[in-house]
Amino acid sequence: MRFMILMKASEQSEAGVLPTEEQLAEMGRYNEELVKAGVVLAGEGLLPSARGARVRFSGGRSTVIDGPFTEAKELIAGFWLIQVRSREEAVEWVRRCPVQDGEVEIRQVAEAEDFGEEFTPELRAAEERLREQVQTRQQR
């Protein structure tokens, strides 16, 4: 089972306040634990929403909205993608995260079987080809 772990933004992270050396070291140790356990697939911190954009779709048209965005608590400051045996194991890993104040969201990644019959064998094969192409590029 794969889970996306979403570190929620804060007023400080949205203001561009960087973590201290101690906080970076703590997070580095946590990330090292994830890697040594073989559960982490990816993980990154994100810059403040002032450096981002949103694209809103309506009626077949798109509109670009430049950041910053309000409601820091609804924004994401970073993420991990992990692969573990259960939701409970994902929760246990997140409980070990060195966060003093804030919120971390855990969301299970959808797998092919979650889409039912609408995800036909042809669509599954096309999806698999795309995943193989991505993996090949990442290995370069």
Image (tube, rainbow, N blue to C red):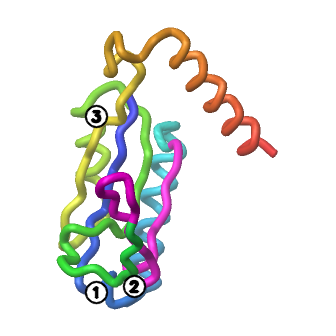
Which residue position is annotated with label 1?
12
Point out the image quarter for the N terminus.
Answer: top left
Q: Tag 1's secondary structure?
A: helix
Bin the neighbour count of mark 3 within 10 Å (Cα to Cα): few under 14, some 14-19, many 20 and up.
few
Part of the protein shown in magenta: 41-62
Q: Tag 3's secondary structure?
A: helix
Bin the neighbour count of mark 2 within 10 Å (Cα to Cα): few under 14, some 14-19, many 20 and up.
some
Question: Which circle's residue, 2 or 3, is located before the other in the chain?
Answer: 2
Tell me if residue 43 is in the magenta stretch: yes
**Looking at the image, which is closer to me, 62 or 83?**
62
Measured in 3D between alpha carbons, the distance from the residue under mark 1 to the one under mark 2, in whole angstroms, is 13 Å
Q: Which mark is residue 68?
A: none
Question: Which circle's residue, 1 or 2, is located before the other in the chain?
Answer: 1
Residue depicted at x 41% and y 72%: 64
Measured in 3D between alpha carbons, the distance from the residue under mark 2 to the one under mark 3, in whole angstroms, is 34 Å
Which residue position is annotated with label 3?
89
**Looking at the image, which is closer to me, 56 or 73?**
56
Residue depicted at x 71% and y 34%: 133
Q: Amino acid at mark 3?
A: Glu
Which residue position is annotated with label 2?
50
Asked if residue 109 lies left or right of residue 21, the reply is: left
Q: Amino acid at mark 2?
A: Ala
Q: Amino acid at mark 1?
A: Gln
Tell me if residue 45 is in the magenta stretch: yes
Q: Image height check: is 122 above or below 9? A: above
Measured in 3D between alpha carbons, the distance from the residue under mark 3 to the one under mark 1, in whole angstroms, is 29 Å
Residue 126 falls in image quadrant: top right
Q: Image height check: is 136 above or below 122? A: below
